Image (cartoon, helix red, strand yellow):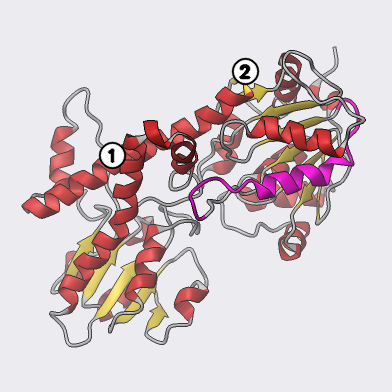
């Protein structure tokens, strides 16, 4: 019997971001020769030096090992391989439908390298039907190859396998989480499973490509709806003058209730984006998902309004914003409501101090403002009149009662309530 290692000597990973880079590094440490591909030459240079271009626990160690052994090398153009993994962005268009241009470009870029027996796996989050489009794009580029069609396997195998890893714990979750594999045919699913068995310790659950695509979107829409309920409840508590944190704590003592913690909004590359893929495809039957998106998208404005109600108490206040990342203990600013709030407040007649221990420099949108500065936690507390907690970084938990005395505190994440 042929082992997965024998079947996959070389693997090309297209897209070296938050998903593609950990995947490429993990595969390389399993003894496979991996070609990483990214259109950003600075990212390519950084990776070839054995350094990640974003912060993630344990990734630098993994990457350094992969590069130093010669098993991982990054390029700006794809290379021939036995398997190709596409992990490129799928941003929202202005109409909030999915922009698949990066997936299409990546697919067409590898098409001329394909040979019979190759495997293509899409990991990018996509609307239902994208894997079938990938088959069509390859068929256009390579009419000499028979693409798979259920139940026929074709000359090449194509599957969809969505990522399910969380920033801050990517290296562990990549190996241990279960994976959904949706092949265009049963042979495609089996071939894709062989690929992931190179490193995966979790279960492999096979299904169709359409179901796999929908599962990824359903997971994040479900989380968005639950966060939306928590955020709406926090709005109700604010209006009624009731402590939201105590309310949630006591409600969750019910054996079948588990209300999430509210926050300043929803960020990240998944939950803030993916529900729109479903809503845009089936708007007439997704009112709940749309409502949750509206609640969560409105939350940053509500936080800004709360800060502004207190600004008038001072001639020119100093406002400290604690955190810019969308979640605790990472440097990830994608779709971050904390960043959105800080950018809005930067235009007010205030001195804005940013505390973000996971960033060396401020984002350009804030750095260009004369009234915005970056400082450490203790210094920011000393000079501030208003303290706004936007991200529950561990470094912020140590604030003493004396440090917060005589300051207006707006704790959007309940950091100092637990």
Q: Which residues are magenta?
A: 94-117
Question: To which quarter of the image does residue 211 belong?
Answer: top right
Check if residue 241 falls in the magenta segment. Answer: no
Residue 97 against residue 177 in the figure, above or below: below
Element type at marker 2?
strand
- C-alpha gap between disc 1 and disc 2: 31 Å
- The residue lying at 85 percent from left, 12 percent from top is 1
Q: Is disc 2 surrounded by few (<14), some (14 to 19) or many (20+) residues within 10 Å?
A: some
Check if residue 115 falls in the magenta segment. Answer: yes
Q: Is disc 1 surrounded by few (<14), some (14 to 19) or many (20+) residues within 10 Å?
A: some
- The residue lying at 67 percent from left, 31 percent from top is 131
Image coordinates for residue 143, horizontal then vertical, percent:
89, 32
- The residue lying at 45 percent from left, 31 percent from top is 218
Image coordinates for residue 324, horizontal then vertical, percent:
41, 63
Residue 126 against residue 360 in the figure, above or below: above
Image coordinates for residue 99, horizontal then vertical, percent:
59, 48
Residue 74 relative to residue 112: left or right: left
Residue 184 against residue 260 in the figure, above or below: above
Residue lying furthest front: 284
| Foreground of the two, 322 or 16 | 16
Question: To which quarter of the image does residue 219 belong?
Answer: top left
Mark 1 in CB contact with mark 2 (< 8 angstroms): no
Image coordinates for residue 150, horizontal then vertical, percent:
72, 16
Residue 266 relative to residue 13: left or right: left
Observer able to see residue 31: no
Element type at marker 1?
loop
Residue picked out by circle 1: 260
| Foreground of the two, 236 or 332 | 236
Nearer-N-terminus badge (1/2): 2
Residue 302 against residue 204 in the figure, above or below: below
Residue picked out by circle 2: 206
């Amino acid at each position: 019997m042929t082992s997965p290692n024998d079947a996959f000597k070389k693997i090309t990973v297209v897209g070296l971001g938050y998903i593609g880079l950990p995947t490429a590094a993990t595969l390389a440490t399993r003894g496979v020769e991996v070609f990483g591909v990214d259109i950003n030459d600075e990212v390519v240079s950084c990776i070839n030096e054995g350094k990640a271009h974003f912060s993630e626990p344990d990734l630098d160690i993994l990457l350094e090992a992969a590069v130093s052994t010669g098993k991982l090398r990054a390029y700006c153009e794809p290379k021939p391989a036995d398997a190709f993994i596409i992990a490129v962005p799928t941003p929202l268009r202005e109409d909030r439908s999915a922009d698949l241009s990066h997936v299409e470009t990546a697919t067409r870029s590898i098409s001329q390298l394909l040979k019979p027996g190759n495997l293509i796996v899409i990991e990018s989050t996509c609307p239902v039907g994208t894997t079938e489009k990938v088959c069509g794009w390859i068929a256009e580029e390579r009419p000499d190859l028979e693409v798979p069609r259920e139940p026929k396997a074709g000359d090449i195998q194509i599957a969809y396998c969505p990522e399910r890893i969380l920033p801050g714990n990517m290296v562990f979750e990549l190996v241990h989480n279960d994976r959904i594999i949706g092949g265009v045919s049963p042979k495609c699913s089996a071939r894709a499973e062989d690929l992931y068995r190179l490193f995966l310790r979790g279960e492999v659950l096979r299904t169709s490509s359409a179901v796999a695509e929908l599962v990824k979107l359903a997971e994040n829409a479900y989380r968005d709806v639950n966060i939306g309920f928590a955020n709406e409840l926090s709005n109700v508590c604010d209006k009624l003058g009731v402590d939201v944190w105590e309310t949630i704590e006591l409600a969750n003592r019910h054996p079948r209730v588990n209300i999430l913690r509210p926050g300043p909004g929803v960020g990240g590359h998944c939950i803030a984006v993916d529900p729109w893929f479903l809503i845009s495809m089936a708007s007439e039957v997704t009112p709940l998902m749309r409502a949750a998106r509206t609640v969560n998208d409105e939350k940053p404005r509500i936080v800004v309004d709360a800060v502004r109600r207190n600004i008038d108490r001072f001639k020119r206040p100093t406002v400290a914003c604690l955190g810019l990342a969308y979640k605790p203990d990472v440097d990830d600013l994608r779709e971050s409501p904390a960043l959105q709030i800080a950018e809005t407040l930067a235009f007010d007649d205030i001195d804005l101090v940013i505390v973000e221990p996971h960033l060396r420099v401020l984002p350009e949108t804030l750095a260009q403002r004369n009234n915005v500065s970056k400082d450490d936690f203790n210094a920011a507390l000393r000079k501030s009149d208003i303290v706004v907690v936007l991200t529950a970084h561990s470094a912020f938990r140590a604030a003493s009662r004396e440090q917060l005395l005589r300051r207006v505190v707006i704790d959007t994440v309940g950091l100092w309530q637990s």
